[in-house]
Amino acid sequence: MSRPGRTRLTRVPGLLYGGDYNPEQWPEEVWAEDARLMREAGVTMVTVGVFSWARLQPGPHTWDFGWFDRLLDLLHAHGVAVDLATATASPPAWLVRAHPEILPVTADGVRLEFGSRQHYCPSSPQYLAAALRLTRALAERYANHPALALWHIHNEYGDHVTECFCPRSAAHFRAWLSERYGTIDALNHAWGTAFWSQRYATYDEIEPPRTAPGPVNPTQLLDWRRFCSDALLALHRAERDVLTELSPDTPATTNFMSMFKALDYWKWAQAEDFVSDDAYPDPADPHAHITASLNYDLMRSLNGGTPWLLLEQAPSAVSWRPVNVPKKPGLHRLWSLQALARGADGIMYFQWRASRAGAEKYHSALLPHRGTASRGWHETVRFGAELARLGDVAGSRLTADVAIVLDWDSWWALESDDHPSARMRWPDLLRPWYTALHARSITITFVPPHAALDGYQAVLAPNLHLLRPEHARRIADYVRGGGHLVCGPFSGVVDGHDHMHDGGAPGPLRDVLGLSVDEFWPVPDGETVTLASGAEATLWTEWIVTEGAETADAYTSGPLADRPAVTRHPYGSGTAWYVSCHLGEDIGDVLDRALTAAGVQPVLDAPEGVEVTVRAGARDTYLFLLNHGDRPARTPLAGAYAAGGTDLLTGGAVHGHVALEPLGAAVIRVAPAPDSPALDSPAPDSPEGTDQ
């Protein structure tokens, strides 16, 4: 269903700019002012209808489209395109009262009430029927409206409700399990139900993993997470099918939520024409731009490196953190340009006009409460003008020589209960590795474990706790053929059923890595273990036994003193490194050695705090430089970029170096180098079968 080869998000020219617009919150006479100000700000598209269900359908047999007709006509008359939401994220009160069984139930048996949003059970047939009826009504009425540029399905699936434990959900779970395993004997084997007398005689005996006296079967929990992601995806696909039937020429997307644990976005991305993301980095976090960069690289990777859309961000402060710090002057601009630098073809916000009532009335907006006299409004207008100057960047793509393997199954299994340490969390293991690459101006792409790895100079796996033999064979073939692998700790421990691999870790990677793990040795809180290189390990260490691998670094303190900590193993024509501990920021030295051997080069030798990326189009190449630091920075231009070019933000010529003030940025159009690397390889189109 996805179209990974797309080079443009919509028919709207240039880069998209705008935000969520909620006109139902305002008297109709305000709409004309909004449309006029949108044009003044350079807005090209707004999202409408996200939470309009109760207004569009006031009752089970009552529809009110007149106001919506007038709204879309008004926006079109002012040259503003529409991202039209299906409005299904917040069922109206009349539907909930007519069918209270729609409301979700927690693992403790508490039924959640109406009064917020996303108050529905993902397995509810009553909710699905009502949602599809609304989607069909919208598509029938507006599929050919000239303002329509994009369909926005639902909104932030799983933001508040990722699971429901009601009887209908239980029945849906049993059906999902039956389709997955076939016989009950196969399920009993997969779940290891010989343990603790958990064997089932029929599927009817199975319930969701509700609150229990003690630890719940870990494979049951793993399958429950798979099921919950699939149940929400089934709702999304049902709406998408209606839109495909009635509005096949208009692209459709739903807004992801960055690196979100609950949903397997590899599978979800296959249902999108392009990926879109909601991102809210914290202005109070000095490292927020690194986390944002990581998330943006994921969004770009999910659909094979094609352009994506930043569908929501905050112009300044949000309203839902314990302390909501505004963005200081210049930060809104810099972080928006960062999304472009990481492959976005549009910058959208929540929201256009700040709300006067409701839970998000303190959330910032492109048009703040103070109106056009406010600082925020002036930044809105200035950035809209700048974005218009960058229109030629649309459709260009990034390149990456380094891949990072990301597997939602492994993430879920890693963070299960009753492990040697509860401190081993995927984002915490990933972040230091990514931070080291970000600081070195090395662009990465994320890949699923079933991806083809040919073409990458290096493949990094900060953690692959759950590893299927067929995926390990792909990694082995990659290294054998001359690839460079760096694998982190607690990897190759369990198979797809969360069963321990025969012979222990690293399981099917034993020959590739040239070692065995004899015993896991987590580090107590507050303690560290030193290595011969001077690096320090926290959280985790392992007693490993080399079986052909050479020791690249060793423990020098604690019970593992003098034992290998980091190893290097030639395998075929390639090399596999294993890091048996959590090194935090010290992982950079190991990566430097491995990436140097792999021939990986940074885009430029940039000073600390300066982010550098390159987007390549059919004719031109665009060099992005962003200064996240609090001091001026000077970056020499070298290699393919030595000749400089034109800064599209200022129109001025750039030669020799780029000088940036704090929070400054440059987007330089340069001639493409004749030896530019190939674009990111698309992930395989295999949305099913990634979790067997």
Image: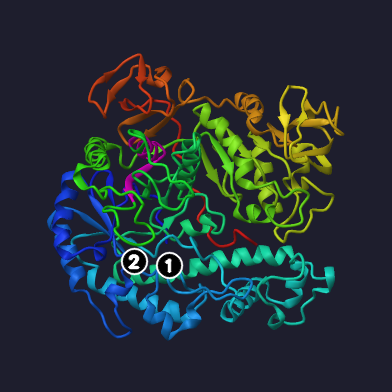
Q: Position of residue 198 (x, y in %)?
A: 80, 73
* Residue in the foreground of this view, choosing between 91 and 457: 91
Q: Position of residue 206 (x, y in %)?
A: 70, 78
Residue 337 part of the magenta-drawn span: yes
Residue at (78, 39) in percent of width and height = 523
Tag on residue 51?
Answer: 2
* Residue in the foreground of this view, choosing between 107 and 509: 107
* Residue in the foreground of this view, choosing between 643 and 120: 120
Compared across the picture, whether 512 is left or right of 382 comes to right
The number of numbered discs placed on residues in the rendered structure image is 2
Three-letter amino acid code of the residue under disc 1:
Arg
Tag on residue 117?
Answer: 1
* Residue in the foreground of this view, choosing between 257 and 677: 257
Q: Quadrant of residue 224?
A: bottom right
Residue extending furthest top?
656
Compared across the picture, whether 688 is left or right of 518 comes to left
User: Is residue 446 visible from the viewing direction of this image?
Assistant: yes
Q: Residues within 10 Å of mark 2 (few under 14, many from 20)?
A: many
Separation of residues labelled 2 and 1 (CA atoms): 9 Å
Q: Are marks 2 and 1 in contact (CB under 8 Å)?
A: yes
Compared across the picture, whether 393 is left or right of 540 comes to left
Q: Is residue 253 above or below residue 307?
A: below
Residue at (60, 27) in percent of width and height = 595
Q: Position of residue 241 (x, y in %)?
A: 39, 70
Residue stretch rendered in magenta on the structure: 333-349
Q: Is residue 660 above or below residue 108?
A: above
Compared across the picture, whether 34 is left or right of 661 comes to left
Whichever of callouts 2 and 1 sits on the residue coming sooner in the sequence is: 2
